[in-house]
Image: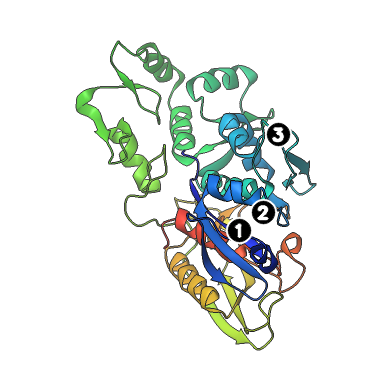
Amino acid sequence: MELITDIQLTVPLTFLNDHNLPRNIRVLRKEKSFYVLTGPFYDLEKFLDKKHPECQPVVVSSTVLDYMKEKYKEKLYRIVGQDVLFKHNSNDTTQVTFKPPASPVSSLQPICMRHRFITFYQRTASDLKVITLDLSPRNVSELEQHYPLLLFKGTKPVTVIGHYIHVAKLEESLRQSPSSRRDRSSNSLPRQGEEICPICMEPMAPKDTKKLQCKHSFCKDCVEQAFSYKPVCPVCGELYGVLKGTQPEGGQMNCTIDPTSLPGYERYKTIVINYYIPDGIQKKEHPSPGQPYKGVSRTAYLPDSPEGRAILELLKQAFNQRLIFTIGRSSTSGKSNVVTWNDIHHKTSMHGGPSHYGYPDPAYLSRVREELQVKGIK
């Protein structure tokens, strides 16, 4: 996964009153109380050395963050350095706070770190799957060696976290008999010049190898199975085709206009989005096929501004591609087999700011646009 080069930042109106913009930085748009800037990361970082705009904490899933710390430790450090505080909450979430750099080694400005961290987190979370297995410590030790990109946590049951296709390969392997797994392992050592498939971690014969346009290579069978789950490169995330999600069918998305304005968007009315997903039975693409799941009703809010209306159209496209919701475990109630959000964040309150999933939050529209872009919605 490559680090992000160009980013978008939100700064107060007064910030630009005191400074002239460098050549490589431009204003995307102006709102009542803030500007949205875009440009190369390092140019924005240097520009922000002059003054520090306010930097709000971010609340993320502890499960995803643990995976990032363990498997993407070097990339995470390159983004946030040591200038970050992690505070674990009781509902399996973690508050991430970005502070001013304490040493020359960590020179990133907090607001730049925050935007880059959010993008990195979203790209990681959108491809992760979490399952629980009843494994012995010996089983875990063997599986950790064969599946180095998976994270195994806890004991009886063991929580397994990783890229959806790696988890699928693990589940397929566990369904095989112990003898067939031993036979496979005995022949898995690579010969000189052989490439290893990033999915199954087995040597690839040239005739059975498929190279994608992004230059990453896989076993033909592995990448075909991966694309049946999600048409993206399992290594870099490049999209190949139209992404379809696992949102249960039969849901509704309705929109109305409220004359009340949202904090930070006083010039505009408010778009009210009502989602409804009924109860049902899980299908083969869901965590527990054949088992019932609990549906959900959710209300979300957008400003009825040009940008808000543009985001609404993208959300409609995402809903039609079954990407807004999925079936899993609720991060708030802890219940399994329920309909949950699927890493496209919504404002479910009109007030209270980011900590209460409400407004004002000047960077929200830019963030949700980035989340949609990760899923191929542009």
Q: Secondary structure at mark 3?
A: loop
Of labels 2 and 3, the one closer to you: 3
Q: CA distance from mark 1 to mark 3?
A: 32 Å
Mark 3: which amino acid? Gln
Along the line of sight, the residue nearer the viewer: 339 or 77: 77
Dots 2 and 3: beta carbons under 8 Å? Answer: no
Residue 131: percent from left, percent from top = 58, 39
Q: Secondary structure at mark 1?
A: strand
Q: Secondary structure at mark 2?
A: loop
Quadrant for residue 102, please give it.
Answer: top right
Along the line of sight, the residue nearer the viewer: 42 or 291: 42
Q: Where 362 sits versus 32, above or below? A: above
Dots 1 and 2: beta carbons under 8 Å? Answer: yes
Q: Residue furthest bottom?
A: 259
Residue 356: percent from left, percent from top = 75, 63
Q: Which residue is mark 2?
A: 330
Q: How is the image coloured?
A: rainbow
Q: Is residue 89 left or right of residue 277?
A: right
Q: Which residue is mark 3?
A: 82
